[in-house]
Amino acid sequence: MVKDGYKFAFPPLVIGLLAFGVHWLVVGAVLVALGLFVAYFFRDPDRQPPEDPDAIVSPADGRVMEVVQESRDGISGRRISVFLSIFNVHVNRVPFDGRISRIDYRTGKFYAAMRGRASAENEQNVIHLSTTRGEIVFKQIAGWVARRILCWKSVGDSVTRGERLGMIRFGSRVDIWLPPGIEIQVRPGQHVAGGSSILARWK
C-alpha cells in the first residue's frame, strides 16, 4: 500500500472497531468498510515491464478512452487517454527510460475525467520525458472526485520504464503524447495496466 494510504485508512478502521465495542454495529460496519476500501484504493502492486526495448508502457491502470492525432509545439503526434475509475490502481508509472526535463503544474477545473475537455481544462501535472528516441509528454489529470495530484519525481531525475512516478487520488485520467515514429498497440475500450501493458512501440 502507498505510504499516504495509512493515514486515510487507519482512522475509520480504528473508530469502526471502537464502535463495534460499544455495540454501534451499523456505524462500525460502515466505518470498517470505508477503511478497507481506502486501503484497497491505495494498493501498490509490483509490475514487471516488458523486455521489448522498443515498448512504451501505460503510465496508468484503466480503460483507454481515446487514441487521436494531436500536434504539440508544431509536431504531429498521437495522444492516448486512459481513464481511471475509483476501482483502478492509482499509482502512476514511467512509460519509457529517460530523464524528466520539465514538470508543469497547471490549475484548472474539475470536470469528470472521462469528458474530453478534461484533457485541456482540468487541473493537471504535465511531465516532459526526454528519451534517446524523442520526447514523450504525459499528464496526471484530476477529475471530479480527484483533488490531489502527487508527483514523486523532480526535474533532472533519470527514470526507468515502469518505475513509480506518482499518484492521483480517486477517479482521474492520464494522457500520454507520443511523437512520430511509433506504432500504436491499443484501441479505445481496452483495459491496460500501468507499467506493464504496451501502449505503443518505437518503429
Image (tube, rainbow, N blue to C red):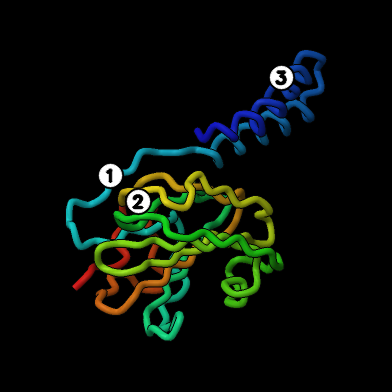
Amino acid beneath label 3: Leu
Q: Residue at x 56, y 42 (%)?
A: 41
Q: Residue at x 22, y 69 (%)?
A: 202
Image height check: is 33 above or below 194? above
For label 1, the crowd category at 10 Å Cα-Cα, with few meaning under 14, some 14 to 19 and many 20 or more, is: few
- Between marks 2 and 3 in the image, the one whose residue lies nearer the viewer: 2
For label 3, the crowd category at 10 Å Cα-Cα, with few meaning under 14, some 14 to 19 and many 20 or more, is: some
Q: Disc 1 and disc 3: Cα gap in Å?
A: 37 Å
Q: Which residue is mark 2?
A: 195
Q: How many circles with numbers are drawn on the protein?
A: 3
Q: Position of residue 166 (x, y in %)?
A: 50, 47
Of mark 2 and mark 3, the one earlier in the sequence is 3
Of mark 1 and mark 3, the one earlier in the sequence is 3
Nearest the camera: 119 or 45?
119
Q: Which residue is mark 3?
A: 17
Amino acid beneath label 2: Gly
Amino acid beneath label 1: Gln
Q: Which residue is mark 1?
A: 48
Q: Which mark is residue 168?
A: none
